[in-house]
Image (cartoon, rainbow, N blue to C red):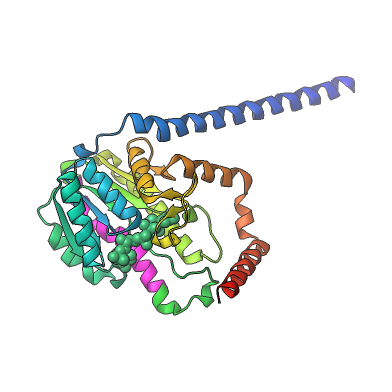
């Protein structure tokens, strides 16, 4: 009997040791990867110029897209800037030309309009050596958060969101990828979101579109890496832009400029990233402390909804 108990005890102790070693080793690897992706990447930056002369950025007149455009110009690229507002595009273009001495081309386009608009973008990019595509343009469905059926003007809202957040990524990739494959090099950066990491109730449609971007990026990278193409998915948390009502920056809320600089440093180091050290730490903490099931709990949705309603009533 005693011998049997001893065997059980020894088995449990051995199991405990194996689990502890596994946890230490796996977390250790994560730490090493974090240091490599977010600290070493800043010291030893990948040479982005090798991808090709022009970078195309969608949603480039403001926020994260504008900062990507500036940062790419600073690193030696000519930049194609695409978004809706001509005046804002002209300002960004002239700033880039004056400050970094790079060429720019602006294209006015509204990505909510669906497939009809891509022919003119395709024509406009003909003959240009596109080394980098940043699929940045994106929109939230409504503000503040709502249950699906409470989304104002739902028919238009969901079509616009899918056109802007999903179709734009697919169509821009379709336009640019063939010449990248022909040259055997190219970089496609797709802006997803931490909201794409798991379903976020009340932000559900936006969250689902960002999950699409994540899945598409990962699959596309696997399909085309042997052809010299890198596809990177960037999944930020809070960045201070118009989309987040220019929320005050701090260690965790990044300015768009700091975010784009850090995120571009990670190219060549990781193909799926929160983009910067502060956001990677937050994402790690969310994964560790909040099991995915928490986000599916009715009570959590109710609590958020109540908080939102109180805020709405306060603002009235
Ligand atoms: N900010 C964050 O905290 C955050 C977090 C996670 C993920 N993201 C993602 O990061 C990306 C950029 O976000 P952001 O915060 O920089 O957004 P933003 O400040 O709202 O800027 C959006 C940019 O896209 C353009 N744009 C918007 N709708 C457009 C449309 N229908 N057609 C063409 N251009 C359009 C805007 O310029 P015009 O108005 O002149 O067209 C602007 O240049 C998005 O994909 C977003 O989902 C942001």
Residue 58 placement: quadrant: bottom left
The N terminus: image quadrant: top right
The magenta segment is: 158-180
In this rendering, would 274 be left or right of 65? right
Q: Is residue 179 above or below residue 2?
A: below
In this rendering, would 28 be left or right of 192? right
Please state the horizontal and vertical placement of residue 210, each as a whole percent of the image. 43, 57
Of 258 and 294, nearer the camera is 258
For the point 43% across and 65% down, the residue is 140
* Residue 98 seen by the camera: yes
159 in the magenta segment = yes
Please state the horizontal and vertical placement of residue 132, each as a whole percent of the image. 23, 47
For the point 83% across and 21% down, the residue is 6
Of 88 and 68, nearer the camera is 88
Q: Is residue 149 above or below residue 263?
A: below
User: What secondary structure is the stretch in magenta mostly built from?
Assistant: helix
């Amino acid at each position: 009997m005693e011998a049997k108990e001893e065997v059980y005890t020894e088995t449990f102790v051995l199991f405990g040791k194996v689990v502890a070693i596994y946890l230490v080793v796996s977390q250790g690897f994560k730490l090493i990867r974090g240091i490599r992706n977010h600290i070493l990447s800043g010291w030893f930056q990948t040479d982005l110029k090798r991808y090709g002369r022009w970078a195309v950025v969608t949603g480039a007149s403001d926020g994260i897209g504008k900062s990507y455009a500036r940062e790419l110009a600073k690193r030696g690229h000519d930049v194609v800037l695409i978004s809706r507002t001509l005046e804002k595009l002209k300002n960004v273009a002239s700033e880039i030309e004056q400050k970094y001495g790079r060429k720019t081309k602006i294209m006015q386009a509204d990505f909510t309009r669906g497939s009809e608009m891509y022919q003119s973008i395709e024509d406009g990019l003909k003959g240009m050596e596109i080394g980098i595509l940043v699929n940045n343009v994106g929109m939230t469905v409504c503000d503040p958060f709502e249950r699906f059926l409470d989304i104002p003007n739902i028919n238009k809202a969901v079509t616009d969101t899918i056109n802007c957040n999903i179709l734009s990524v697919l169509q821009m990739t379709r336009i640019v990828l063939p010449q990248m494959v022909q040259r055997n090099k190219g970089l496609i950066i797709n802006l997803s979101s931490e909201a794409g990491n798991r379903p976020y109730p009340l932000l559900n449609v936006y969250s689902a579109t960002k999950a699409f971007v994540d899945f598409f990026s990962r699959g596309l990278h696997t399909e085309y890496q042997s052809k010299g193409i890198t596809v990177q998915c960037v999944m930020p948390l809070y960045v201070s832009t118009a989309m987040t009502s220019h929320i005050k920056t701090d260690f965790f809320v990044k300015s768009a400029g700091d975010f784009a600089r850090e995120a571009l440093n990670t190219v060549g180091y990781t193909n799926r990233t929160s983009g910067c050290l502060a956001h990677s730490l937050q994402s790690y903490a969310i994964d560790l402390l909040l099991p995915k099931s928490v986000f599916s709990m009715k009570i959590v949705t109710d609590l958020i909804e109540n908080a939102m309603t109180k805020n709405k009533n306060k603002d009235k």
